């Protein structure tokens, strides 16, 4: 795990590059995110490089979690259709047991997906960084 101090603009560039690429935003409470990470992006493995927590320079402290869209994530989202997978922008992780988390997908509406995918991700990024 690496730690780096970034300026707001550096952070925005990295997030923009990743979110416009093959990464999504992950929302949830810290315990749910921990269970999700342990099951989908196990710490200490190569897969964990696809799970990043970015702390924002705000008070109170906030963070953004981003995850790479991997085969293991797709397997976790049982039965996800190709169109939904291709247009996935965010997931919400909810703790449902001691070591289980439920994942809800957030996709763009089909009629807007191709036209709006880039714009929607940039709006999401702006919303996430608001107040930094």
Image (spheres, rainbow, N blue to C red):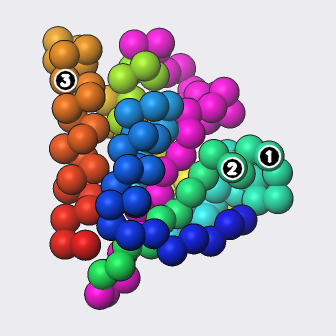
113 relative to 34, above or below: above
Q: In the image shown, does 39 or 69 lie closer to the viewer?
A: 69
Label 1 near label 2: C-beta < 8 Å? yes
| Residues at marks 3 and 1, CA–CA distance in whole angstroms | 32 Å
Q: Give the crowd class for mark 3: few <14, some 14-19, many >=20 residues within 10 Å.
A: some
Q: Secondary structure at mark 3?
A: helix
Q: Which residue is mark 1?
A: 46
Q: Are marks 3 and 1 in contact (CB under 8 Å)?
A: no
Q: Determine which quarter of the picture holds residue 71.
A: top right
Q: Is residue 78 magenta?
A: yes
Cα distance between the residues tagged 2 and 1? 6 Å
- In the rendering, which numbered label is found on residue 49? 2
Q: Secondary structure at mark 2?
A: helix
Pointer 3: what residue? Answer: 116
Asked whether 56 or 7 is in front, the reply is: 7
Q: Residue at x 40, y 59 (%)?
A: 10
Q: How much space separates mark 3 and mark 2, taking CA atoms?
A: 28 Å
Determine the residue positioned at 19% across, 72% down.
131
Q: Dividing the image into 4 quarters, which one contains the N terminus?
A: bottom right
Instruction: Name the residue nearer the viewer: 8 or 45.
Output: 8
- In the rendered view, tell whether residue 112 sits above or below residue 10: above
Give the class, few, some or many, for how many residues have Cα within 10 Å of label 1's Cα (few <14, many ≥20).
Answer: few
Region rendered in magenta = 59-83
């Amino acid at each position: 795990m690496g730690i780096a101090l970034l300026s707001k603009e550096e952070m925005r560039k990295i997030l923009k590059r990743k979110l416009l690429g093959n990464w999504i935003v992950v929302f949830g409470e810290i315990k749910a995110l921990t269970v999700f990470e342990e099951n989908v992006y196990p710490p200490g493995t190569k897969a964990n490089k696809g799970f990043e927590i970015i702390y924002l320079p705000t008070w109170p402290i906030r963070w953004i979690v981003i995850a790479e869209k991997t085969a293991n994530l797709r397997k976790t989202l049982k039965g996800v259709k190709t169109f939904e997978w291709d247009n996935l922008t965010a997931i919400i992780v909810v703790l449902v047991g001691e070591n289980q988390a439920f994942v809800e997908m957030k996709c763009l509406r089909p009629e807007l997906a191709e036209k709006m995918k880039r714009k929607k991700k940039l709006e999401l990024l702006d919303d996430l960084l608001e107040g930094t």
